Image: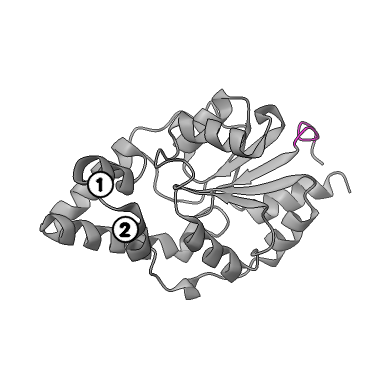
Amino acid sequence: MRAGLHHIRNWIFDLDNTLYPASANLFALIDARIGDYVARLLNVDAVEARRIQKGYFHAHGTTLSGLMAEHDVDPHHYLGDVHDVDMAVLERNEMLIAALARLPGRKLIFTNGDAPYAAKVLDRLGLGDTFEAIHDVHATSYRPKPDPVAYHGLLDAYGLDPHESLFVEDMARNLRPAKAIGMTTVWIDNGSEQAPGDEDRSYIDHITTDIGQWLFDILEEDA
C-alpha cells in the first residue's frame, strides 16, 4: 500500500462519474430527464428549465434539494422518474473490480442518488456484492453532499473514524467537507461538471483520472 495510506480502514466512494468514467455519459441521460421533469413541473420551456435546474444544483447541492425546498416535490417520485435510464452505456472495468476486491477494510457508497438506482448501476458494473452499504440521499434526510451534515451522518451511521477513512469523488467541492473532518480525499478529474468558481484544490490529497488504475497502483506498490 502506498506510503501515507496504510492507516486507511474505510474506503468510501461516490457513485456517478466516479465508479464509471464521465465519458460513459450516463449522467447526461439523467441530466436530460431532470430538465424534462423541471419543465413539466413548472410549465416552462427547456431553456428556462435548464436555468432553474442548474441554479438549484449549484445552490442546494442537488436539483432535488432545490425542488423540495421551493416546490415541495416528492423525492421518491422525482428520483424514480429521473433515474429511469438505460444502463447499457456502462461497461465493466475488470481492473476496478479486482482492485476493489483486494482493498483491505470496509467499502461503502456515499451518493446523492438513491439506493435502488445505485444498486442497478453497481450490478451493471459488476460491483453488486462489493460494498457493505449504500448511504444515499434518503439516509442524509435530503441534505446532500456537500452539506457537512451528510458527512457526519455517514460517520455516525457506520461508526467510521474520519481519520481512517478515504473518500473518492468526481465533484471536487464534495471533497472539501470530507477533508475538513479529517478524511483523506481523492478527486477523479475526468471532465465531469464542476461548480462555477470552484477552483480551490487545496483540500484534495490525491488526483487521478481513473480510479481503477489508481487503486491498482497503490496496491501494487506494497505487493
> What count of labels does the image hold?
2
Question: x, y percentage for residue 135?
Answer: 55, 47
Question: Looking at this view, is 182 or 80 the one in front?
Answer: 80
Vertical placement of residue 4 versus 92, above or below? above
Evaluate if marks 1 and 2 touch, with contact meaning CB atoms under 8 Å apart.
yes
Quadrant of the image occupied by residue 27: bottom left
Quadrant where the N terminus lies? top right
Residue that appears at 80% across and 48% down: 219
Q: Name the residue under label 1.
A: 67
Answer with left or right where residue 206 lies relative to residue 46: right
Q: Is residue 4 located in the magenta-colored stretch of the structure?
A: yes
* Left or right: where 34 falls relative to 85: left
Residue 25 at what x, y percent from top left?
Answer: 43, 64
Residue type at the position of mark 2: Tyr
- What type is the residue that disc 1 sits on? Leu
Residue under numbered circle 2: 78
